[in-house]
Image (tube, rainbow, N blue to C red):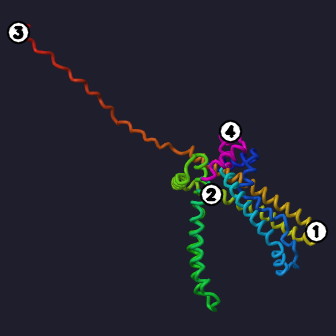
Amino acid sequence: MEYTPILKQAASIMWKHKVLWVLSFFATGSIYNIYLIFPTTAFGPEMDIQGLEALFAENLFLIFGASFAALLLFIAFWVLSLAAQGGLVRLVADADSGVAVRGRTGWKTGFGLLGRIFLLMIVLFVPYAIVAAVVTGLIAAPLLLAGMEEDLSGPFLVFCGGMMIGGPLLIVGGILLDMLSHLGLRHIVLGDLSVIRSIGQAWRDLRARFKDVVVMWLLLFVISIIVWGIMTSGTVLLEAIQTFVTQFSFWGAVAVGFLDFLLLTAGAVIWWSFHSGAWTLFFRRAELSAEPTQSVAAPSPLPVAETPAPVNPAPAPTIDG
């Protein structure tokens, strides 16, 4: 498997077809970063607990209404993110095949397969979340039950031992599920498989091409560390500037926060367009490079001579003959 051409092609498609950025904006949930616009120190230290209680008491219905509206918006954007993920797979495959890339096609595909994409995420990650919560609770239970005892060395050793065993298992399990989700999503979108069949086929793909899938995942993981490291550095710098500017101008701090929002959103959108495209191209190349499984009968080592047909003997001559 050649990985460099896949990454180069993914970057080329991402940069050439800007419509992918629109779908990536919703796929990454970048709208939730809007909180970065407003400075966290806008209320100042003089806003004490009693002041906050009075503010909530005076605007209780307004706060509940705003919270309900925020919940509905969260659900709406989450649904859009699932549809956008499916649409990105379709559009990258179209670009790779030379078909015209249209945002309408991506959204149509994403919403048409929304139920299957939703169930795929539920089947894969909800059981994992439950298991992770149970394992974490069992690991932390000895330390929590010890309470305020003077000697916590014993419970702490049990906690550390549990983390050394359970932590790596949860990490490896999460990575495997992440790989299965990428492959299963593409089986749903490009192969039109059901949820269970897509997971089963993704598992077979993972077993058959384990080395290729792991290397691809590691490559994208390393690239993500570099990309998010750069963006995080810029975000931390801008947040420090925003905190400083808040002392002089609220709207100046909002302007800095808006730059922070744009930086984080642009980075996330470009990265996800590349990331989704790389997995789609990997998926297609892996299928195209698979060896055919048709069985061919082995030729006979020696030619077999044809058996001549039996010849009936001529009748014996008679005396009358």
Inspect the image, locate mark 4, and give the three-letter code of the amino acid beneath it.
Val
Label 1 crowding class (10 Å Cα cut-off): few <14, some 14-19, many 20+?
few
**Left or right: 211, with 311 as reference point:** right
Q: Secondary structure at mark 1?
A: loop
- Range of residues picked out in magenta: 87-115
Whether 170 is drawn above or below 298: the answer is below
Cα–Cα gap, marks 2 and 1: 45 Å
Pointer 1 residue: 249
**Left or right: 186, with 244 as reference point:** left
Label 3 crowding class (10 Å Cα cut-off): few <14, some 14-19, many 20+?
few
Q: Earlier in the sequence, mark 2 or mark 3?
A: 2
Q: Would you say the residues marked 2 and 3 are in contact, meaning their CB atoms lie under 8 Å apart?
A: no
Q: Can you give x and y, in whole percent of width and height, for residue 310 in the image?
A: 21, 23
Label 2 crowding class (10 Å Cα cut-off): few <14, some 14-19, many 20+?
some
Is residue 206 inside the magenta stretch?
no
Residue 319 — which label?
3
Q: Secondary structure at mark 3?
A: loop
Q: Earlier in the sequence, mark 2 or mark 1?
A: 2
Pointer 4 residue: 99
Q: Can you give x and y, in whole percent of width and height, for residue 175 in the image?
A: 60, 62
Cα–Cα gap, marks 2 and 3: 97 Å
